[in-house]
Image (cartoon, coloured by chain):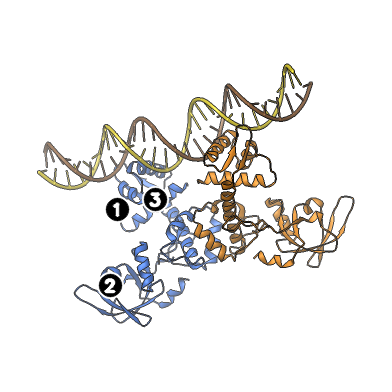
Chain colours: A blue, B orange, C brown, D yellow
Amino acid sequence: MTISEENYLKIIYLLSENTSKEISTNAIADMVKAKASSVTDMIKKLANKELINYEKYQGVTLTELGIYKAKIIIRRQRLWETFLVDKLNFSWDEVHEIAEELEHIKSEKLINHLDAFLNFPRLDPHGDSIPNQDGIIYESQKVLLSEADLNKKYICVGVKDTSSHFLKFLDNKKITIGTIIEIIERENYDNTLIIKIENTTTTISNKIASNLYINNTDPNQLLITN
Amino acid sequence: MTISEENYLKIIYLLSENTSKEISTNAIADMVKAKASSVTDMIKKLANKELINYEKYQGVTLTELGIYKAKIIIRRQRLWETFLVDKLNFSWDEVHEIAEELEHIKSEKLINHLDAFLNFPRLDPHGDSIPNQDGIIYESQKVLLSEADLNKKYICVGVKDTSSHFLKFLDNKKITIGTIIEIIERENYDNTLIIKIENTTTTISNKIASNLYINNTDPNQLLITN
DNA sequence: TTATTTTTTTAGTTTTGCCTAAAAATAATA
DNA sequence: TATTATTTTTAGGCAAAACTAAAAAAATAA
């Protein structure tokens, strides 16, 4: 597979995560930053390789093979992101572009050694799951902070919005994967939350809270992060 | 610069190391595994970018800018090779192909962080010098084992032949960067050497000895390896 | 239901990096 | 030195992945 093919496949996979419907040409074009006509060309190529199901004018879905291949690409991306943050001290808003390049390095052995070197992490620095070498994903149940209960301790396990703007905001508030958060008060009018992070309290808007994933199950799952 | 341009530049640099003459089209074609006509195309492109000096039918030399850019590519390659061997436990004959891909990842910050993570190594796993971020190379003086004196302790600092065949042979003999070698006897007829490595003696042919670099200066230079 | 808008596809180009075949220049040899 | 051989360059093509412009299909609105 070429780098371009891999990029399309990954993007179709990510778009498919939120829906069971066919993915439209335009939706793909937006994500890969290409024109719709270019997308049509590539779609045909991927369909020929039996990575996607495609009927003219009807959008695409991934085949079993396509899903597997996409997961392997996602695995590579997320392992590299973990490496960049955990080992090379990048902050979580800097890693995306670099990992985007690294994810296309072809050696399977490389990725498996990297996985071992990082201690088989299950979550990347944004809290997204890292598929294993068979493409299997162990999802940890996660809930948006905006849906959480008062006076319980939660662990931050991920973000919904991965824009560097939002990630920098979280850095400022000292919120990262693994941070323990407790909701002290919920303002009923606009759902603003007063939360406690390591003995300091801050106020966060509902918009923030609905972009932060927390985990309310076994706190030992925290250990899988690094 | 595209990946292909970078590859050509790196190869012209490596070919220039052993000679002060112009590098021929065919020599480049051999190394990049392309036809001479393709090389001519690329040569023109690199000359337009003022990375090489080129006159029709006269071969090429690198410009100052070309030398600098080539060193930066070599730096990336050798740092990745060091990473693969030191951190991901690859053996020194496995890293070349993978590093060949990794070396084209564009982020300067990535490479500088990697350099720091590896503790600013000066030599890669084959004993080749790693240029710093300004392209400066601190060469350690090295001599071929075939030229060394009897009954002195030397440190293996590199190899001349980097073929996986030779590297595997060295692995078998337990010779690697940093190995301490002493010549016990030299057979005058064919220059076969009897050497001592950590209290075991072996015989090695002149061919082997003239592909192994050793260092007879300050043994502390060993420390720069990892 | 027809007309309009939007989406998707087709057709034809461009650029990059490679190729083959043939021509031109240089090097080697008789 | 003239001839032959080798090397290098030119000319013309091809495939990948993008593009624009126009046509076709589908979705939306009057």
Residue B119: x %, y % from top left = 59, 66
Name which of mark 3 and mark 2 comes first in the sequence.
Answer: 3
The amino acid marked with disc number 1 is Lys
Nearer to me, A101 or A113: A101
In the image, A51 versus B89, the foreground residue is: B89
Q: Chain of mark 1?
A: A
The residue where tag 2 is placed is: A147
Co-location on one chain, circles 2 and 1:
yes
Q: Where residue D26 appears, x then y in whole percent?
A: 24, 43
Residue that badge 1 annotates: A21
Three-letter amino acid code at the position of disc 2? Glu
Q: Earlier in the sequence, mark 2 or mark 1?
A: 1
Q: Is residue B201 visible in this depiction of the protein? A: yes
The three-letter code of the residue at mark 3 reads Thr
Q: Which residue is mark 3?
A: A63
Label 3, label 1: how many angstroms apart (C-alpha)?
13 Å
Q: Within 10 Å of the Cα at label 1, are there few (<14), some (14-19), or many (20+) other Cα atoms?
A: few
Disc 3 on helix, strand or loop? loop
